[in-house]
């Protein structure tokens, strides 16, 4: 399944400034593994060592947070868009 | 120097007032040093208590029990992830650049807190606008960038 991964600005230093990367994958976890093969080191910015998505990162399939789907086991279909964003948070 | 239209300035102040005593937050977009549009994003701090706690960013002695939802949003913001993602796509679709974020300090000065400085590391170098309502009749809006943990202020010029 060819899917498109949307790379957020803070992670583009890993992807030679590319904003989108296409990979073949049938789950989100597989897509992130393929991304890491292309750009080593990027997956550990997104996932804990056990594979779960880090608390300060959200991963989306077609705009839906995978926490409300099946996490990194969420299946992918041809043409799906996998989004990644770090949290925006702060305080006073 | 950051330039912004009066409508964008007023939208941030109005959002800050509407959410007080909770913190308001949103994204800002434009071109280069010119802000053109601001996009409010819901504050979901009450769902991110563990996120702040694991970074030591909950003040000692404060009680943010799960049965007191919303309490943390008075002193923290955490943008709703799906909405943040949707707005980032919209900014791109509108042909604008994502320049950074804004949030309010309902009761403190318009200067980045320790929490702001630490969490700015996820989006290095982005513009950080802070709207203080410490004096409710005299809102203050200031702009900063945090680079390697150091705070740099950028003067704001409101146009129109
Ligand atoms: Zn703040």
Image (spheres, rainbow, N blue to C red):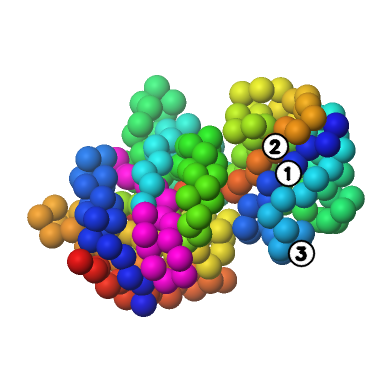
Q: Position of residue B100 (x, y in %)?
A: 46, 59
Q: Nearer the viewer, residue B31 or B101?
A: B31
Q: Nearer the viewer, residue B114 or B83?
A: B83
Picture quarter containing residue A11?
bottom right
The label shown at residue A5 is 1
- Secondary element under disc 1, as helix, strand or loop, is strand
Q: Which residue is mark 3?
A: A16
Residue sitting farthest toward the right: A37
First-in-chain label (1 vs 2): 1
Q: Position of residue B114 (x, y in %)?
A: 44, 60
Residue B100 makes an appearance in the image: no
Q: Is residue B26 magenta-colored?
A: yes
Picture quarter containing residue A81?
top right
Q: Chain of mark 1?
A: A
Q: Chain of mark 2?
A: A
Q: Which residue is mark 2?
A: A81
Q: Is residue A20 above or below residue A53?
A: below
Residues behind callouts 3 and 1 on a single chain:
yes
Q: Are marks 1 and 2 in contact (CB under 8 Å)?
A: yes
Q: Which residues are magenta?
A: B22-37
């Amino acid at each position: 399944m060819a899917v498109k991964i949307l790379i957020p600005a803070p992670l583009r230093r890993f992807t030679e400034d590319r904003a989108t990367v296409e990979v073949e994958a049938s789950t989100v976890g597989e897509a992130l593994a393929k991304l890491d093969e292309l750009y080593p080191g990027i997956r550990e910015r997104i996932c804990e060592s056990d594979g779960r998505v880090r608390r300060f990162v959200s991963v989306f399939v077609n705009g839906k947070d995978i926490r409300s789907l099946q996490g990194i086991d969420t299946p992918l279909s041809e043409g799906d868009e996998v989004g990644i964003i770090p949290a925006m948070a702060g305080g006073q | 120097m950051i330039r912004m239209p009066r409508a964008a300035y007023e939208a941030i102040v109005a959002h800050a007032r509407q959410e007080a005593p909770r913190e308001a937050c949103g994204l800002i977009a434009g071109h280069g040093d010119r802000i053109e549009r601001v996009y409010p994003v819901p504050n979901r701090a009450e769902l991110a208590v563990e996120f702040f706690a694991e970074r030591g960013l909950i003040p000692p002695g404060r009680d943010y029990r799960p049965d007191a939802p919303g309490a943390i949003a008075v002193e923290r913001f955490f943008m709703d992830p799906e909405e943040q993602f949707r707005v980032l796509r919209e900014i791109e679709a509108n042909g604008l650049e994502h320049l950074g974020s804004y949030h309010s300090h309902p009761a403190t000065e318009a200067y980045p807190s320790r929490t702001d400085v630490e969490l700015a590391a996820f989006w290095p170098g982005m513009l950080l606008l802070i709207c203080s309502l410490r004096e409710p009749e005299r809102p203050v809006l200031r702009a900063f960038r945090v680079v390697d943990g150091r705070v740099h202020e950028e003067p704001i010029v409101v146009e129109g």
